[in-house]
Image (spheres, coloured by chain):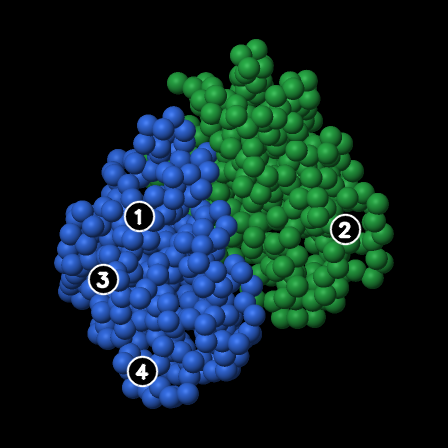
Chain colours: A blue, B green
């Protein structure tokens, strides 16, 4: 049976990417060897890494604009630490919009003073703060553009003259933004880019080198830039599969094209949530994420029926995070409008049956 | 044509492991979803992680002996840093036996005093130091059990009452040792364990918690232990493929079985190096690595002929590292005795022709 994979991450990737990735594990491009058994210094892999870095900048519209793309180990959680290592001299500002912002703040506090410029923690992060003053003396302002667990998303990126750093793990490559407003963007691969095990960092080169501390090599963005993102052996398979996904997105028409699909998917699901009296949205309407829709049943007694219905339809990964409960439908780039249609039909069916 | 893969790492893995890994990228165990698109909190992946951790301890003979196995992001280079974060309070001792030891020393110096207890650097690391005194006031002693670039290997592990930490990246699971003499072992996966992108850390729990500094979460072994090696999303594919390789090794008879094959391969090649007047070994005989044999041509004029011969035979990855020159034949667990035979035959052929 065809699965409809709404998993929050690791999550659905394009079918053709998974086919090509699997094939490369057997043999890469007719070289007689597997992708995972060749040297990362081989011409084949150096080309893959360069292509991945180049595609990332191209898709974000940041080619030849003073930015570098790096594919690093560790996940976004490692970036919480690396950002502070490289940018936090005295005082940094963070917008606290969810669990991941909160963790980023915790790690940064080991390196200097951290100001929570605004927070929605007291409302269980169900909205994005809007009226706040950004202190002028910060080393940088850090935001989390999309909050996977709560289903909120910045529709307007804060305006500031400070260096702006963004954890874009769960909505990178999903919507058009002026990406040059950021000094650093980071994103764990496992939503819109590839399998878990690699993190994309896009950094404006002249924003670096402004802290006085000594930075360990693996934590130092400059070291990774100097070594063309190959300071140590990179996570070969995740990098390759990310490259394939970025190529897939480019062939599709890039962010401009996928953005339209993502808006349609989100509209379809949120209309159903709003019109169907059996469901309630969790996040404030104006802050709703196009990637992760969070919702609950108005009547918990329907839970067993609803759960049986979507499982029977081949839907996977719909359970909400324990911090919110209910349901979470993650609609990353590779999820089809058809899959969202299947979910919406089940929600309507439930209304008819109830 | 069949390839004989002597690559130094990433390197050859068992054929059946690559087949199974490729198949799981299409679909994992008939669940209708790919390994790389399911949640790392799914029962399927939690089981994979637990199996990998359990197999690692079992193969090393460290089950129920107070050790924990972790599969972390970052490669051995990240461990250079993590080891110092977790163990270096005042002063640590390192044996400098190659490029990787040297890098480990450099990173540790950011955290405290580092004593180079012994070094073979002035002889381009062609031997393992033997007569040295280990100071009694060190927080730990760090060694690199096998030196990939230079082709040397500790045949005797230093005796000490200090906590002993070992970078075993390039010979873990290849030979029998009393692994309980180590307080911490780390190893990048991409030699005997799996594809690049994950690092095995095996740590004695009661050796932790002895430094006073605050440790960032991602750097803290205790945090990773408390979260069953899932503090953040792990590198799913590298962990899965490592689990398959460990299972392959167990089915083969474990380290005791593979050790014999590895000794045969090494004997076969080193005999040829010693008996064939056209070749010279690089490393001191008593310190020769069973994993990486380094050698040069006695007469550089034969280089083009020899290179053409081994390439024609389907041999891959035989060029030496630039620090040593010549050739390096890496004979990790998955390389067959047959492949070593092919290389040795070519070396003999060259002697007949020359």
CA–CA distance between discs 2 and 3? 52 Å
Tell me where residue B82 appears, x and y as whole percent: 61, 58
The residue to which callout 3 is attached is: A61
Is A330 rendered above or below residue B284? below
Question: Mark 2 or 1, which is nearer the eye?
Answer: 2
Is B316 rendered above or below residue B241? above
Asked if badge 4 and badge 1 are on a common chain, one would say yes
Element class at badge 2? strand
Are the residues tagged 2 and 4 within 8 Å (C-beta)? no
Residue at horizontal 83 percent and vertical 49 percent from the top: B132
Are the residues tagged 2 and 1 within 8 Å (C-beta)? no
Question: Mark 2 or 3, which is nearer the eye?
Answer: 2
Asked if badge 2 and badge 3 are on a common chain, one would say no
Residue A51 bears which disc, if any? 1
Element class at badge 4? loop
Chain identity of mark 3: A
Q: Nearer the viewer, residue A269 or A169?
A: A169
The residue to which callout 4 is attached is: A161
Quarter where residue B53 is shown: top right
Quarter where residue B158 is shown: top right
Tell me where residue A142 appears, x and y as whole percent: 38, 74
Chain identity of mark 2: B
Residue at horizontal 44 percent and vertical 35 percent from the top: A38
CA–CA distance between discs 3 and 4? 21 Å
- Can residue B111 be spotted in the picture? yes
Tell me where residue B183 appears, x and y as whole percent: 73, 50
- Can residue B47 be spotted in the picture? no
Q: Mark 3 or mark 4: which comes first in sequence?
A: 3
Question: Mark 4 or 1, which is nearer the eye?
Answer: 1
The residue to which callout 2 is attached is: B118
Question: In the figure, is residue B56 to the left or right of B96?
Answer: left
């Amino acid at each position: 049976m065809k699965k409809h994979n709404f998993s929050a991450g690791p999550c659905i990737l394009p079918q053709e990417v998974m086919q090509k990735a699997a094939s490369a594990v057997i043999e890469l491009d007719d070289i007689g060897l597997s992708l995972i058994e060749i040297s990362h210094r081989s011409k084949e892999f150096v080309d893959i890494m360069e292509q991945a870095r180049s595609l990332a900048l191209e898709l974000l519209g940041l080619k030849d604009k003073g930015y570098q793309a790096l594919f690093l180990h560790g996940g976004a959680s490692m970036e919480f630490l690396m950002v502070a290592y490289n940018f936090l001299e005295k005082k940094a500002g963070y917008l606290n919009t969810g669990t991941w912002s909160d963790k980023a703040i915790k790690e940064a506090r080991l390196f200097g003073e951290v100001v929570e410029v605004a927070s929605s923690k007291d409302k269980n992060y169900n909205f994005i703060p809007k009226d706040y003053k950004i202190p002028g003396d910060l080393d940088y302002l850090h935001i989390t553009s999309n909050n996977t667990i709560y289903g909120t998303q910045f529709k307007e990126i804060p305006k500031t003259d400070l260096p702006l750093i963004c954890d874009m793990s769960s909505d990178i490559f999903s919507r058009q933004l002026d990406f040059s407003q950021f000094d650093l963007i980071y994103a764990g691969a496992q939503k819109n880019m590839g399998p878990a095990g690699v993190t994309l960092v896009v950094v404006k080169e002249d924003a670096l080198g402004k802290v006085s501390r000594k930075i360990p090599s693996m934590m130092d963005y400059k070291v990774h830039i100097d070594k063309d993102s190959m300071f140590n052996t990179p996570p070969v398979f995740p990098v390759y599969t990310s490259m394939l996904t970025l190529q897939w997105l480019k062939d599709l028409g890039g962010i401009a094209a996928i953005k339209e699909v993502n808006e349609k998917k989100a509209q379809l699901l949120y209309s159903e949530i709003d019109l169907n009296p059996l469901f309630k949205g969790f996040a404030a309407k104006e802050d709703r994420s196009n990637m992760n829709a969070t919702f609950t049943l108005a009547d918990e007694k329907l839970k067993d029926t609803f759960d049986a219905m979507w499982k029977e339809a081949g839907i996977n990964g719909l359970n909400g995070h324990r911090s919110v409960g209910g349901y979470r439908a993650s609609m990353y780039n590779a999820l089809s409008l058809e899959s969202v249609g299947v979910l919406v039909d089940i929600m309507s069916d439930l209304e008819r049956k109830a």
